[in-house]
Image: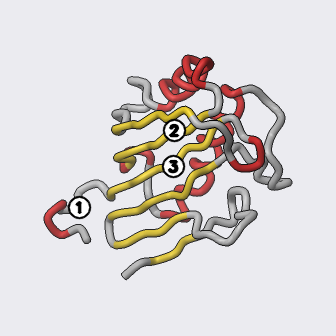
Amino acid sequence: MHERITSAHGPQPKFMYTPCIRNGALGIVSGMVALDPQTGTLIDGDVAAQTQRIFDNLHLALPDYRFGLDDLMLARIYTTRMDLFPAINQIWERQFTPTTQISPPARTSVGVSALPLGALVEIEFMFCQNGADPTTLP
């Protein structure tokens, strides 16, 4: 059974969609852009600042979604600035350092012409609860 989950700790959806949908051990988090959690508006900042805000917002919401970063299986990064991808990657690598002891997930990166609200970066995430038996997933 699908469970639709929201979080009061991060930015609230601007449009009609479910921020996180979970079915047992599997969870998919809708694409996130760099919204200020207080105002719900896109932050001012370059591609690195927007990428960091996305991860900060993800960390705010994960307890409500009942996942940890170590459950992250896949991330899809969309950006209007592939020429600045090294800055996105630098923020990405900070999330998965030896000190965090979290292995980076599989990842896809796509250059696009536009993103919602004029964002430079959008990232969606897929989680699978640690210890789940993959043969029993929906």
Q: Which residue is drawn at 23% across and 61% down?
A: 132
Q: Which residue lies furthest to the left in this view?
A: 135
Residue 83 in the image: x percent, y percent? 60, 18
Q: Residue at x 54, y 71 (%)?
A: 5
Q: Is residue 79 left or right of residue 40?
A: left
Q: In the orientation shown, which residue stands out farthest toward the bottom?
A: 1
Q: Relative to 75, does residue 93 appear above or below in the rendering?
A: above
Q: Where is residue 36 in the image (x, y as percent from the top left)?
A: 78, 47
Q: Name the residue under label 3.
A: 124
Q: Residues within 10 Å of mark 2 (few under 14, many from 20)?
A: some
Question: x%, y% of residue 52?
Answer: 64, 34
Which residue ends up furthest to the front in the rendered image? 113
**Quick check: marks 1 and 2 in contact, CB under 8 Å?**
no
Residue 86 image offset from top left, x and y in percent? 55, 17
Check disc 3 and give the amino acid type. Answer: Glu
**Mark 3 secondary-structure assignment:** strand
Residue 35, disc: none
* Residue drawn where x is 61% and y is 50% of the image: 32
Q: Mark 3 touching mark 1, by CB under 8 A?
A: no
Q: In this rendering, is residue 102 above or below 90?
A: below
Q: Name the residue under label 1.
A: 132
Distance from disc 1 to disc 2, alpha carbons, whole Å, reads: 25 Å
Identified at 85% across, 54% down, the residue is 39
Of pointers 3 and 1, the one earlier in the residue sequence: 3
